[in-house]
Amino acid sequence: MGAAGTGTEGEAGERRQLINVAYRLLGSLAEAEDAVQEAYARWYALPRRRREEIASPGAWLTTVTGRVCLDVLGSARARRERYAGAWLPEPLPDRAEWDHGHGADPADRIVLDESVTMAFLVVLESMTPAERVAFVLHDVFRYPFAEISGVLGRTPGACKQLAASARRRAEGARTPVAADGHTDAVRRVKAAWETKDIAALVDLLDPAAVMTADGGGMAGSAPHPVEGGARIARYMAAVADRAPGLELLVRSVNGVPGLVARRGGVVLTVASFEVAHGRVTRIWVVRNPEKLRPWAGDGQGPRSGEKP
């Protein structure tokens, strides 16, 4: 890894890597940016001689960022118990198809791959903070357990066991991005929702499908998961009845085709889907406006093959 503070380009690359690590650890772009900022603040707070003694500033920053994230994860559980309704990770747009204006944005620096799909991030939420750190740093970013032990304050062997436990939880969650049939299923859901075709929606949804919504107490949403394809279909049709003028777009959500709903150019909802054997098994709906800030913009870019 490069040395921190040895040039604008070098620091930008280092910061980008750290934000990618922190976002996967926290599931929140805003918290990831704060964690990286805190790591840099601690770096520059060191006496100059001490900084010069550190052989790998990048490794030092990664360790500190990991520790900051570990602390955030530890306190997040209590905060999320007080959260209004279900808590979901922040969805990310693909800037190649979502024109949000000018200037750098943390979302621009996130590499969109199978380790940031909503399905994978939700599984990460089920892990203990230590499991999540060990797993993400080792399995996703390939850091050796010797370095991870410095983050967790445990032996390399203990870190290896944590990663193994987390790996069992994550089995099957890291599906290939844009798998065959996923885009088609999402487009068909869009068409059925727009025509309020409940029968078509029921056919597209797995009978055991589950929809989870995150409004954060700031936007209307189902307070509890909606279970069962037929119930979800009726719920979606009812929403369509109450949402005149809502525009639905097929967009990349965390690297996988999803749906974005907006009115008057303002994004109100972002939905992610898990598809198996051509049918939707999970839907994650984010309506909390604080989690939709990266989606601000006109959204008139290319549509990943979407037909108007």
Image (cartoon, helix red, strand yellow):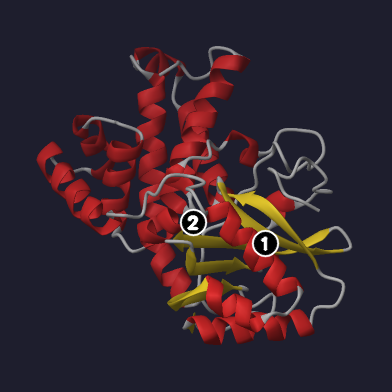
- The reply to whether residue 83 is in sight is no
* Of the two numbered discs 1 and 2 in the rendering, the one whose residue sits closer to the viewer: 2
| Residue under the image location 70 percent in, 36 percent down | 96
Q: Is residue 207 left or right of residue 173?
A: right
Q: Is residue 78 left or right of residue 290?
A: left
**CB of mark 1 within 8 Å of CB of mark 2?**
no
Up/down of 94 relative to 74, above or below: above
Quadrant in which residue 50 is drawn: top left
- The reply to whether residue 92 is in sight is yes
Q: Nearer the viewer, residue 184 or 6?
A: 184
| Residue under the image location 14 percent in, 48 percent down | 161
Q: Is residue 301 left or right of residue 20?
A: right
Separation of residues labelled 1 and 2 (CA atoms):
17 Å
In x, y percent, where is residue 249?
74, 57
Task: Name the quarter where the N terminus is drawn.
Answer: top left
Q: Nearer the viewer, residue 210 or 105?
A: 210
Residue type, numbered disc 2: Met
Residue wearing tag 2: 118
In x, y percent, where is residue 4?
49, 20
Residue 139's tag is none
Residue wearing tag 1: 290
Residue type, numbered disc 1: Glu
The secondary structure type at the circle numbered 2 is helix
Q: Is residue 41 left or right of residue 220?
A: left
The secondary structure type at the circle numbered 1 is helix
